[in-house]
Image (tube, helix red, strand yellow):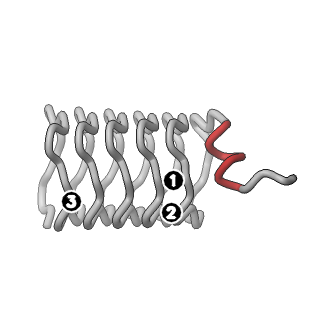
Amino acid sequence: MAESISEEISKKVLSGETLENCDLSGLDLSKGTFDGAMMSGSNLRMANLRNASLDGADLSHANLEGADLRNTSLKNTNLAEANLEGADLREANLTEANLTGAILQAADLRGADVWQAEFYDTN
């Protein structure tokens, strides 16, 4: 039986890959490695990124509405102008992340590490 796209993506290390403007909405990408990936403008609405690593990734202008980002590593990640409305970021590592202009309404940041993260002009 053929594997689904989410199974294909979640098994691979996609560090440094270009996935800009891709529709990855609703996919199970948990435990995936996307360090340094270029994902600007991608649709990750309702995606499961729990326990994934996105260190240094570019998620600017991405739609992460309702995404599961629990215990996800987002160190030095560019989330400028990203839509994180209703996203679950509990215990996420947002150290030095750029959230300038991000939408954070109803996002759950309990226990998240936000050391030196930029939250300028968020709403």
**Label 2 belongs to which residue?**
42
Identify the disc placed on residue 8.
none
Q: Residues within 10 Å of mark 2 (few under 14, many from 20)?
A: many
Q: Residues within 10 Å of mark 1 (few under 14, many from 20)?
A: many
Identify the residue at horizontal 73%, vertical 56% (top origin): 4
Amino acid type at image mark 1:
Met
Q: Looking at the image, do the residues carrying marks 1 and 3 touch, with CB atoms under 8 Å apart? A: no
Q: Is residue 116 above or below residue 90?
A: above
Which quadrant holds the C terminus? bottom left
The residue furthest front is 1
Q: Is residue 105 above or below residue 56?
A: below
Q: Nearer the viewer, mark 1 or mark 3?
A: 3
Identify the residue at horizontal 16%, vertical 45% (top origin): 118
Q: Looking at the image, do the residues carrying marks 2 and 1 touch, with CB atoms under 8 Å apart? A: yes
Q: Is residue 39 above or below residue 12?
A: below
Relative image position of residue 79 (x, y in whole percent): 32, 52
Q: Is residue 33 left or right of residue 81?
A: right
Identify the residue at horizontal 52%, vertical 48% (top origin): 38
The kind of secondary structure element at disc 1 is loop
Relative image position of residue 41 (x, y in whole percent): 47, 64
**Label 3 belongs to which residue?**
107
First in sequence: mark 1 or mark 3?
1
The kind of secondary structure element at disc 2 is loop
Identify the residue at horizontal 15%, vertical 62% (top origin): 122
Amino acid type at image mark 3:
Ala
Q: Is residue 89 above or below residue 105?
A: above
Relative image position of residue 22 (x, y in whole percent): 59, 63
Foreground of the two, 100 or 109: 109
**Label 1 belongs to which residue?**
39
Amino acid type at image mark 2:
Ser
